């Protein structure tokens, strides 16, 4: 039987760094990733505290929300930029109309 070592907290730190850089609560992060109903706030907390390992679907959702590659999140040797390119309603939504 092959045993896997518990993952270093690098992924946990990166996930929290993304959420904090985007200025979102854990519930807001879930909404931003369009994972309401399939992801609980408690799970996000566990991911960020390295208590649970997120699924690939969750890692992909974080990467897409932050505009970074999945590789940056999962490779401990790659650093996540301090300034995550933030995608909010203001930057991705439709442009406001001027009268």
Image (cartoon, rainbow, N blue to C red):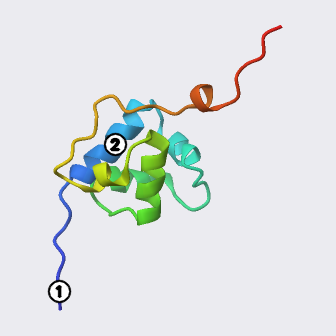
| Quarter of the picture holding the C terminus | top right
- Which of disc 2 and disc 1 is earlier in sequence? 1
Separation (CA) of disc 1 from disc 2: 30 Å
User: Badges 1 and 2: C-beta atoms under 8 Å apart?
Assistant: no
Residue depicted at x 39% and y 43%: 68
Residue 54, given in percent of the width and then of the height, sits at 38, 62
| Viewer-side residue, 28 vs 10 | 10
Quickly name the residue at label 2. 16
Residue 20: give x, y in percent of width and height.
Answer: 38, 34
Q: Who's the residue at 27% across and 52% down the image?
A: 11
Mark 1 Cα within 10 Å, few/some/many (few <14, many 20+)? few
10 Å crowding of disc 2: few (<14), some (14-19), many (20+):
some
- Residue 57 in the image: above or below residue 96: below
From this viewpoint, is residue 43 visible?
no
Residue occupying the far top of the picture: 99
SS for dot 1: loop
Quadrant of the rendered image containing residue 66 = top left
Q: Residue furthest bottom?
A: 1
* Figure quadrant of residue 90: top right
Q: Which residue is found at the position 35% from the left and 46% from the top?
A: 15
| SS under mark 2 | helix
Percent position of residue 24, x then y: 48, 34
Q: Tell me if 22 is positioned left or right of 14 in this view.
A: right
Q: Which mark is residue 88?
A: none
Q: Which residue is mark 1?
A: 2
Q: Residue at x 46, y 31 (%)?
A: 86
Q: Is residue 35 above or below residue 25?
A: below
Quarter of the N terminus within the rendering = bottom left
């Amino acid at each position: 039987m092959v045993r896997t070592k518990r993952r270093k907290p690098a992924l946990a730190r990166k996930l929290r760094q993304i959420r904090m850089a985007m200025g979102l609560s854990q519930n807001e992060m879930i909404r931003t990733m369009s994972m309401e109903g399939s992801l609980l706030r408690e799970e996000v907390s566990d991911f960020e505290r390295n208590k649970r390992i997120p699924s690939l679907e969750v890692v992909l959702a974080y990467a897409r929300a932050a505009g970074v590659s999945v590789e940056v999140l999962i490779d401990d040797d790659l650093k996540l930029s301090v300034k995550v390119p933030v995608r909010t309603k203001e930057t991705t939504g439709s442009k406001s109309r001027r009268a």
